[in-house]
């Protein structure tokens, strides 16, 4: 079965990877001359489930995606994978109430998620922290850019091909995995997606910050130094759709760190930046499944700020749907993802 995938970011390449492993023949059409040049082009990204206080169909998606990603990333040796763990700092009263509830309701063993005092968190981080934290030892970071290339290895790719009309594509099945550009196809232009601009900032490690051993998340995030550089992320600007980096955004990323971990922010120098557009949906949940009213047409989009996990889970679900086999997610979650929830 030939499957044409429109878009060569994480959503498209993850589909290609899982479909190929299932014995199908995916082909990627990418508008840019190279894969992973848009939202998926960052050199570092963090993978964490999206937390919710209660166990819901949505949280089931991220919980399943997390365990899937942990196992999948181990297969690659060229994606800058660092399973360094993540400390989610308790920076406000909301998180102080919410995190214990998350822990209780998600029911994860303490090997996978636990609350730590500031003292214990500091031991794990390798630097002094003033706040208690929720700790996920299996979280980490990866290069989304490299991950796209690893997923696409051995897959036929058509770079520089801007698909304008699905009728011209020769394939049994088509998957739209092109972020905001789903709006350009009449079959999908009713999907309520919008851009969320984001910018990451690379900073040079100081002797103190170089000791950081895991990701710190505090509304923003900082990753451990790699080749002398940390990644600070990320800004959020809904509906803004330009990709020019802005100094003000670098300052925002630094200010967030300075507010939460002043010792760590001391003396950090900006070494680079990158801005891109996330795609989000009206209900802030990804859109994954068959497009209603069309035969053999699927979509994987609106992965928001958790695309590393979300796109891999989506790829598994679409593969199950295409092969008409038992689904990897509960029905309630599949319904929440279904594009038909927005049917006009
Ligand atoms: C600043 C920033 C920081 C982020 N940090 C994290 C993080 O730490 N962890 C995390 O999990 N997620 C993070 N994300 C989110 C994550 O990067 C995205 O969710 C993910 O990259 C979305 O992948 P995608 O394939 O849907 O979109 P994209 O990567 O945008 O890919 C879509 C592709 O489709 C192509 N395309 C468009 N139209 C056409 C057409 N007509 N024909 C052919 N090709 C077409 C585009 O050229 C593009 O390559 C971050 C995003 C940003 C912007």
Image (spheres, rainbow, N blue to C red):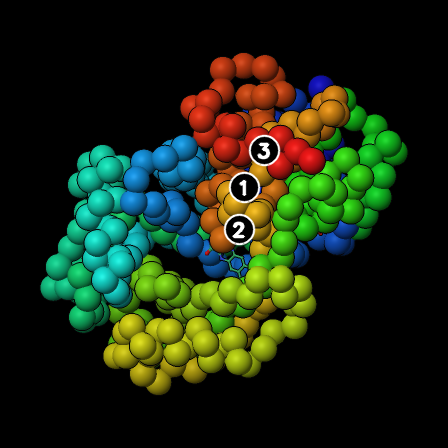
Q: Distance between the residues labelled 1 and 2?
A: 7 Å
Which residue is the site of mark 3? 341
Left or right, 213 with reference to 119? right
Please report the residue visible at 35 percent of the width from the left and 73 percent of the height from the top.
257
Secondary structure under badge 1? Answer: loop
Check if mark 1's residue and mark 2's residue have beta carbons within 8 Å. yes
Residue 78 rendering spot, x and y as whole percentages: 49, 48
The N terminus sits in image quarter: top right
Secondary structure under badge 2? Answer: loop
Instruction: Please tell me which residue lies in front, 15 or 289.
Output: 289
Residue 176 rendering spot, x and y as whole percentages: 69, 38
Residue at the right extreme of this rendering: 168
Q: Quadrant of residue 290?
A: top right
Q: Residue 259 carries which label?
A: none
Which residue is the site of mark 2? 304
Please report the residue visible at 77 percent of the width from the left and 35 percent of the height from the top.
187
Left or right, 335 with reference to 9? left
Query: Mark 1 or 3, which is nearer the eye?
Result: 3
Q: How far apart are marks 1 and 3 (CA)?
A: 11 Å
The C terminus sits in image quarter: top right
Q: Residues within 10 Å of mark 1 (few under 14, many from 20)?
A: many
Q: Residues within 10 Å of mark 3 (few under 14, many from 20)?
A: few
Which residue is the site of mark 1? 286
Please report the residue visible at 47 percent of the width from the left and 72 percent of the height from the top.
202
Residue 319 seen by the camera: yes
Residue at the front extreme of this rendering: 344
In the rendered image, the vertical position of residue 337 relative to residue 253, given as above or below? above
Q: How far apart are marks 2 and 3 (CA)?
A: 18 Å
Query: Mark 2 or 3, which is nearer the eye?
Result: 3
Residue 277 rendering spot, x and y as whole percentages: 61, 59
In the rendered image, the vertical position of residue 62 relative to residue 233, given as above or below? above
Please report the residue visible at 47 percent of the width from the left and 65 percent of the height from the top.
234
């Amino acid at each position: 079965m030939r499957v044409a995938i429109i878009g060569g970011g994480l959503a498209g390449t993850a589909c290609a990877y899982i479909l190929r492993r299932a014995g199908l023949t995916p082909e990627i059409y990418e508008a840019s001359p190279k894969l992973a040049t848009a939202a998926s082009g960052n050199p570092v990204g963090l993978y964490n489930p999206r937390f919710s206080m209660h166990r819901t169909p949505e949280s089931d998606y991220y919980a399943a995606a997390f365990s899937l990603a942990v196992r999948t990333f181990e297969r690659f040796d060229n994606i800058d994978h660092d399973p360094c763990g993540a400390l989610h700092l308790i920076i406000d009263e909301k998180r102080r109430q919410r995190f214990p509830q998350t822990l209780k309701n998600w029911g994860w063993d303490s090997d996978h998620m636990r609350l730590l005092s500031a003292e214990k968190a500091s031991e794990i981080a390798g630097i002094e922290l003033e706040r208690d934290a929720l700790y996920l030892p299996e979280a980490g970071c990866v290069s989304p850019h490299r991950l796209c290339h690893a997923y696409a290895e051995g897959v036929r790719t058509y770079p520089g091909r801007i698909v304008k009309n699905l009728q011209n594509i020769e394939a049994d099945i088509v998957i739209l995995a092109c972020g905001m550009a789903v709006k350009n196809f009449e079959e999908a232009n009713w999907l309520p997606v919008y851009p969320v601009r984001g910018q990451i900032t690379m900073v040079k490690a100081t002797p103190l910050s170089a000791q950081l051993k895991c990701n710190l998340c505090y509304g923003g995030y900082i990753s451990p130094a790699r080749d002398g550089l940390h990644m600070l992320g990320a800004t959020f600007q809904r509906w803004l759709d330009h990709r020019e980096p802005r100094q003000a955004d670098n300052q925002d990323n630094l200010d967030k760190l300075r507010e939460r971990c002043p010792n760590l922010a001391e003396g950090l120098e900006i070494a680079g930046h990158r801005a891109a557009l996330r795609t989000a949906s009206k209900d802030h949940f990804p859109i994954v499944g068959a497009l209603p009213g069309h035969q053999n047409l699927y979509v994987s989009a609106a992965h928001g700020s958790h695309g590393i996990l979300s796109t891999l889970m989506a790829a598994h679900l679409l593969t199950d749907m295409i092969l008409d086999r038992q689904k990897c997610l509960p029905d309630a979650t599949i319904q929440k993802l279904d594009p038909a929830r927005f049917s006009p």
